[in-house]
Image (cartoon, rainbow, N blue to C red):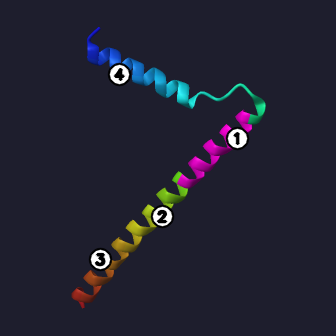
Amino acid sequence: MTITAGLLGALEGHENLINRPPKNEDQYENWNQQKLDDAKEKRINDLNDTLSDIAKIRSVAEQAARMWK
């Protein structure tokens, strides 16, 4: 195993420890709620990005329609 592969393996193991749910029930509920909140925030951001893209496309289409007249 090369040094780079070893470091990457260590980083991957560290990431798994970070994402592992806690064993304490109260901590688990907080951890789980945070994961749900993060997923919700990401989904909202993705939807906002999509709406922004649609608005840009609409603007270009309206400009093209005006030029076509």
Residue lying at the far right of the rendered structure: 25
Look at the image and give the residue range highlighted in magenta. 27-41
Decide if residue 65 is on the left or right side of residue 49: left
| Residue that carries the numbered disc 4 in the rendered image | 8
Q: Does the magenta stretch include residue 28?
A: yes
Residue 44: x percent and y percent?
Answer: 54, 59
Q: Is residue 66 above or below residue 33?
A: below
SS at circle 3? helix
Residue 55: x percent and y percent?
Answer: 40, 73
Residue type at the position of mark 4: Leu
Residue type at the position of mark 3: Val
Residue type at the position of mark 2: Asn
Instruction: Check residue 30 in the rendering and tell me which mark sits there, or answer none.
Output: 1
| Residue that carries the numbered disc 2 in the rendered image | 48
Residue lying at the far top of the rendered structure: 1
Residue 57: x percent and y percent?
Answer: 34, 71
| Residue that carries the numbered disc 3 in the rendered image | 60
Residue lying at the far left of the rendered structure: 67
Distance from disc 2 to disc 4, alpha carbons, whole Å, reads: 34 Å
Mark closer to the chain start, 3 or 2: 2
